[in-house]
Structure formats: structure tokens, C-alpha cells
Image (tube, rainbow, N blue to C red):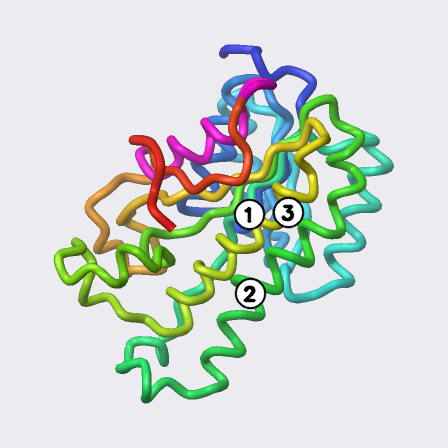
């Protein structure tokens, strides 16, 4: 096991499965202590146990991004055990069944539900953990976005996913991109770097495992952004091949 991240503490939301689990595995295999944040503590503990079998220092924390009490409890736990946080990966997200309708037919409740997790949840977790990230020598925030959040690509009729016009999901990822840019600008004079990443069409529960990319591939860019050097970029949107258009 590589130990280039030894001493680093990383929290990944929605990490009991899918891309989040794989990000945790890759960071942990490089020596980081990984905090498996999940709504269901039992599933989180199962995931952490599996990682520990591979000699990864994994811990489970109960964190529901739409329940402030669980966010606050997680902050207290990290403060008490580690005194800092080096890496935050905002991975948790949803695509509601009601979002598969034409945009004009989507119910307002679907929009609210999606934003509650995908936008407000990302902000709530980031805001609460920012003081601990500021205690790191080189804090990193990675927001899982999507090419479906790109206004440029959504406007292109030749875009590979031009037919995927999910009003709530796509626009929520556009909002995540905006949060990324604005937070990066605020933190530009600190060691913290904030970026968004597109994992690509990865086979996960969110698409009934129809994606053609593996979770190993989907995690590549997020792990790269989570481990950027001191002179790395901040305030960008990337996949493993480079810049993704806004």
C-alpha cells in the first residue's frame, strides 16, 4: 500500500457504495484515513469493514446531508478524533424518478427534493466542515458534478447525452458548479482548493447500472482533485481527460 497520504483524513459522503466507496478505497489505499459517511450507519459500517479487510484505515460515520443534526455530530466527531479534515468529497446525490418527465411536466416537489440533497446538502456539509478544512495544511474539496450540469453541453444537440434532459438533476449539478466557483474564489488566498468533477456515465444505482464506465474509472478524476499539489488549480470543472465546459 502506498503511503503518500498517510496522516491525511478524508470524508466522502454517500460512500457506502458506488463511486463514493471507490473514491474512499483509492484514497485509503494510498494511506489516508477515510471516513465513510452514509445515512445508514449499518451499511456504512459494512463498507468500512470491507475496506479494513484490505488494510485500509476506514471509519463509519452517520451523516445524512439533509439532516443538520447528523452533520453537526460528524463535525464534533472529527474535531474530537482528528482535529482537522484534509479532504472532503461531496459525492452523495439523487436522481428522482419524477425527474424522468419532460422538463415542463416535472413536479415542483421533485425539484425541491433533488435540490435538498444535491445542492443544499452539498452546501450544508461544506459549510459545517470548512473550519476543520482550514486547519489542514492543504485542504481539498471535491464536488461530484456531471456533464449533465454543463450548460454548454446541454445546449449542444450533438452532445452524447443530449436526450438526457432531467430538469431537477441537471440544473442541480449546474448549481453545484456555481457553488464550486464561488467558494473557490472566496478561498483563493488559502491553501484550500475547490473543484468539481464529472465521473462520466458510470454504472451505479442512480442509473440502474446502465452506465458503461466502471466505478474505478468514475473515481479517477475525483481522487486526482482530492490529492492536488500545492500549485494545483482551484475553481474548475474536470474529468480525467481535462477541463469540462461550464
Q: Earlier in the sequence, mark 2 or mark 1?
A: 2
Q: On the image, numbered disc 2 is attached to which residue?
A: 117
In this picture, residue 41 sits left or right of residue 111:
right
Query: Are the two marked residues, 2 and 1, in contact with CB atoms closer than 8 angstroms?
Result: no
Between circles 2 and 1, the one closer to the viewer is 1
Position of 225 relative to 77 (above/below): above
Residue at horizontal 70%, vertical 65%? 67
Q: Give residue 118's position: percent from left, percent from top.
A: 52, 62
In this picture, residue 51 sits left or right of residue 125:
left
Position of 20 relative to 32 (above/below): below
Tell me how far mark 2 sits from mark 1, CA to CA. 19 Å
Q: Main secondary structure of the magenta part?
A: helix
Dot 1: within a 10 Å radius of its alpha carbon, few (fewer than 14), some, or many (20 or more) residues?
A: some
Position of 6 relative to 193 (above/below): above
Query: Are the two marked residues, 1 and 3, in contact with CB atoms closer than 8 angstroms?
Result: yes
Q: Secondary structure at mark 3?
A: helix
Dot 2: within a 10 Å radius of its alpha carbon, few (fewer than 14), some, or many (20 or more) residues?
A: many
Q: Give residue 65's position: percent from left, percent from top.
A: 63, 60
Q: On the image, numbered disc 1 is attached to which residue?
A: 181
> In the rendered structure, which segment of residues is drawn in magenta?
217-231
Q: On the image, numbered disc 3 is attached to which residue?
A: 183
Tell me how far mark 1 sits from mark 3, CA to CA. 6 Å
Position of 39 relative to 95 (above/below): above
Residue at horizontal 56%, vertical 41%? 89
Kindly indicate the quadrant of the structure image that contains residue 151: bottom left
Q: Secondary structure at mark 1?
A: helix
Amino acid at each position: 500500500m502506498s503511503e503518500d497520504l498517510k496522516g491525511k483524513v478524508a470524508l466522502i459522503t454517500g460512500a457506502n457504495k458506488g463511486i463514493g466507496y471507490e473514491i474512499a478505497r483509492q484514497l485509503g489505499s494510498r494511506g489516508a484515513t477515510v471516513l465513510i459517511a452514509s445515512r445508514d450507519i449499518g451499511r456504512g459500517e459494512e463498507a468500512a469493514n470491507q475496506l479494513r479487510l484490505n488494510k485500509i484505515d476506514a471509519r463509519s460515520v452517520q451523516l445524512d446531508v439533509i439532516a443538520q443534526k447528523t452533520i453537526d455530530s460528524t463535525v464534533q466527531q472529527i474535531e474530537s478524533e482528528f482535529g482537522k479534515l484534509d479532504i472532503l468529497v461531496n459525492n452523495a446525490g439523487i436522481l428522482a424518478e419524477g425527474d424522468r418527465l419532460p422538463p415542463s411536466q416535472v413536479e415542483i416537489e421533485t425539484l425541491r427534493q433533488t435540490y435538498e440533497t444535491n445542492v443544499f446538502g452539498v452546501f450544508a456539509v461544506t459549510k459545517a466542515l470548512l473550519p476543520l478544512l482550514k486547519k489542514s495544511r492543504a485542504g481539498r474539496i471535491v464536488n461530484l458534478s456531471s456533464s449533465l450540469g454543463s450548460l454548454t453541453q446541454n445546449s449542444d444537440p450533438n452532445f452524447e447525452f443530449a436526450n438526457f434532459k432531467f430538469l431537477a438533476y441537471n440544473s442541480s449539478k449546474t448549481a453545484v458548479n456555481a457553488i464550486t466557483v464561488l467558494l473557490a474564489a472566496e478561498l483563493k488566498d488559502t491553501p484550500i482548493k475547490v473543484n468539481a468533477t464529472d465521473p462520466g456515465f458510470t454504472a451505479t444505482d442512480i442509473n440502474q447500472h446502465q452506465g458503461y464506465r466502471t466505478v474505478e474509472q468514475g473515481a479517477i478524476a475525483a481522487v486526482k482533485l482530492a490529492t492536488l499539489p500545492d500549485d494545483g488549480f482551484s475553481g474548475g470543472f474536470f474529468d480525467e481527460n481535462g477541463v469540462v465546459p461550464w
